[in-house]
Amino acid sequence: DAKTTQPPSMDCAEGRAANLPCNHSTISGNEYVYWYRQIHSQGPQYIIHGLKNNETNEMASLIITEDRKSSTLILPHATLRDTAVYYCIVRPHNNAGNMLTFGGGTRLMVKP
Amino acid sequence: DVKVTQSSRYLVKRTGEKVFLECVQDMDHENMFWYRQDPGLGLRLIYFSYDVKMKEKGDIPEGYSVSREKKERFSLILESASTNQTSMYLCASSLSPAAYEQYFGPGTRLTVT
């Protein structure tokens, strides 16, 4: 699986958009970008995924650059409950075992 | 909503004990997974199962075994617990091998003394 690089921490004011970057310069053509988050003392939670087009769901938007070497997860109106560690993962859609490998992630702190 | 439950949130065991961690999902998912999560090491796959009585080794299977007798239940067994198995254990499930999402349980924090 391609390696990802994320900033270790970010702050965001409540009600503002949180933009979380991820670099994945070695991504290959069949690899998707996935985002999960983990709130303290809970299991990881799926947020969104994409291949090359921008994606939006009820939780977030995912913007992938044209060369696919980086992406940004956008939480449009961050709340205190969005405080969590956010993980960016790249992997093939149907890789063996369908396993996930999390790196260090970005610790997002939403402040009042 | 998909629900993945784990038998204990916190567990303390002694070195050499046999430990059973149970995981149950209620959405008829085919795939189930056991991970451990440690600071600085991220999430690492121990074992996964894509069908009843089927199992595959993940990245770090040594010291662990698994059992899947029923589709909804996937058990992780530590045959003889050691202190280096102190960790957060996370169970997950997904609908199929091609599913995008994995659904995680709340985790079991195991301490081996």
Image (cartoon, coloured by chain):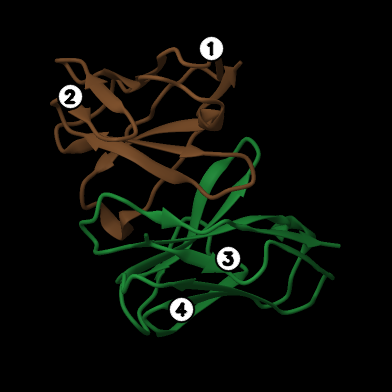
Q: Are marks 1 and 4 on the same chain?
A: no
Nearer-N-terminus badge (2/1): 1
Specify few, some or many for label 3: CA neighbours under 10 Å numbering under 14, 14-19, or 20 or more: few
* Residue type (three-letter) at the residue carrying disc 1: Ala
Q: Secondary structure at mark 2?
A: loop
Chain letter of the green region:
B
User: Which mark identifies residue B73?
Assistant: 4
Residue A62 horizontal/vertical position (percent): 27, 25
Q: Secondary structure at mark 4?
A: strand
The residue beneath circle 1 is A13
Q: Secondary structure at mark 1?
A: strand
Residue B86 horizontal/vertical position (percent): 73, 57
Q: CA distance from mark 4 to mark 3?
A: 21 Å
The residue beneath circle 2 is A54
In this picture, is B71 found above or below A102?
below
Q: Are marks 2 and 1 on the same chain?
A: yes
User: Which mark identifies residue B62?
Assistant: 3
Chain letter of the brown region:
A
Q: CA distance from mark 2 to mark 1?
A: 24 Å
Residue B69 horizontal/vertical position (percent): 43, 87
Can residue B78 be seen?
Answer: yes
* Residue type (three-letter) at the residue carrying disc 2: Asn
Q: Residue at x 32, y 33 (%)?
A: A2
Specify few, some or many for label 1: CA neighbours under 10 Å numbering under 14, 14-19, or 20 or more: some
